[in-house]
Image (cartoon, rainbow, N blue to C red):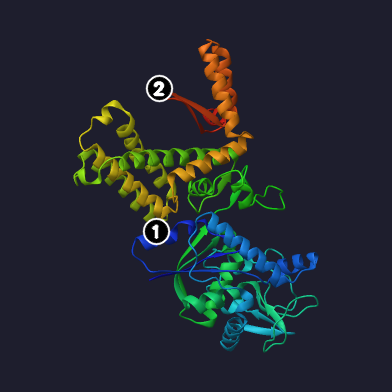
Amino acid sequence: MISAILAMLASTSTSTFFSGRYLKHLGYEVSYVRNFTDVDDKIIARANELGEDPISLSQRYCEEFCQDMITLNCLTPSVEPKVSEHMPQIIDMIEKILNNGYAYIVDGDVYYTVEKFPEYGKLSGRDLEDNRAGERVAVDSRKKHPADFALWKSAKSGEPFWESPWGPGRPGWHIECSAMSATYLGYSFDIHGGGVDLVFPHHENEIAQSCAACNKSDISLWVHNGFVTVDSEKMSKSLGNFFTIRQVVDIYHPLALRYFLMGAHYRSPINYSIIQLESASDRIFYIYETLHECESFLNQHDQTVRKDSIPPDTANIIDNFHNVFVTSMSDDLHTPVVLSGLADPLKSINDLLHTRQGKKRQFRIESLAALEKSIRNVLTILGLLPTSYSKVLQQLREKALKRANLTEDEILQKIEERAAARIQKEYAKSDAIRKDLAVVGITLMDSPNGTTWRPTIPLHLQEQQNNAP
């Protein structure tokens, strides 16, 4: 059984986008806990600014966060505990830490004694003397050591509080996660994740307090995702370069955003840029268009005439793709390699559908069915398979129209104008219409059956991409 507590509201690990599905694909039983910090200093300060109850404020943001995760096609966790609903468990753990001699009480506050835990710093690699007060460590002259951290904070005016053996107050930031993970997963479990910024002090403190409460506490694997950056700077509200998921999916399809996030290894920083999102959107349009054409072709042919055999070259493409998928995903969820691996089976489908040689291939139908199935299986595990190829293609077109500030009727009118110009041999005008549309991310495709359009990367971004070193 794989148990996992993988995310917090403040820093959801991008590995959670696809790790659960892959672990289930491997046959593991997955218990996924995603906990919410709905009581802390920042929430209280924000609630006081708004004149709102902190718990109500947190609840609203928790609900919005969950909706964003659904939008991105993330699996629903097994359980989603909140701090405010687990005070008895938090208080019980603090009592265990006190009874085991790892904490002390000062004026209704309870502090963890880091010097009592020789392994403190093993996750972050920091020496205890490096943890100076004021550097991610709260300054408090009452503490025995500058790195000691609060397990319980005594009540202050204007803050929510709960009764405890040490008087009214609320938990410190770190203890909540240990208490909730122990409640739902036990003191030892497999995977714990979050943002790289949580390695110290948050996760370091979690290890210390959990081991103080239970000396058999153990987490097998820590997974930390890199930051999202904008022009190589960390995305943050303070820098004014902050984008919400809802802002992004207003103009880009959620599956394009998901694909973009999988385009970098989860431990690496990922640079948010329009060109990256445009490229992701263009790529998934190509993927779904190819699969839609393949599905439509297969639906036109009698299923009963298909044989089980496929040509060796097609079997090799499928086997290689499967091997890349398993090897890369098992190598710390290396999704960029998997996404690159889609190229060969997709190209093979297009060759079989559209090229003269491909149309003459023996076992063509069987090959298309096997290729489509292999891609569909991988997209399902990655959370990238839409409910309908045709529906998502239409949605991608609508998002492209919104970015281009055009309607489909306006594009169809441009196509008619261009056709008339070509009849009149006004080729300069025809080329100008095509280029004007390409500039805003609309490409025209001519065929014997007429001219159609599809979204593409805007022309200036294509040029930027081509000229990149």
User: Of the residues shown, which amino acid type is indicated by label 1?
Assistant: Tyr
Q: Which residue lies furthest to the top in this view?
A: 425
Residue 118 lies in quadrant: bottom right
Mark 2 surroundings: few (<14), some (14-19) or many (≥20) residues within 10 A: few
The dot on residue 22 is 1
- Nearer to the camera, 218 or 189: 189
Q: In this view, does 59 lie to the left or right of 51?
A: left
Alpha-carbon span between mark 2 and mark 1:
44 Å
Q: As displayed, is residue 345 above or below residue 430?
A: below
Mark 1 surroundings: few (<14), some (14-19) or many (≥20) residues within 10 A: some
Local SS, label 1: helix
Residue drawn at (64%, 67%), measured in percent from left and top? Answer: 131
State the image coordinates of residue 457 (x, y, percent, origin top left).
54, 33
Q: Earlier in the sequence, mark 2 or mark 1?
A: 1
State the image coordinates of residue 137 (x, y, percent, origin top left).
68, 68
State the image coordinates of residue 469 (x, y, percent, origin top left).
53, 31
- Nearer to the camera, 148 or 229: 229
Q: In this view, does 134 lie to the left or right of 49?
A: left
Residue 213 lies in quadrant: bottom right
Res 133 seen here? no
Residue 94 lies in quadrant: bottom right
User: Of the residues shown, which amino acid type is indicated by label 2?
Assistant: Pro
Residue drawn at (39%, 38%), measured in percent from left and top? Answer: 290
Q: As displayed, is residue 17 above or below residue 365?
A: below
The N terminus - image quarter: bottom left
Residue drawn at (44%, 38%), measured in percent from left and top? Answer: 286
- The label nearer to you, 2 versus 1, is 2
Count numbered badges in the picture: 2
State the image coordinates of residue 249 (x, y, percent, origin top left).
59, 48
- The residue carrying mark 2 is 448
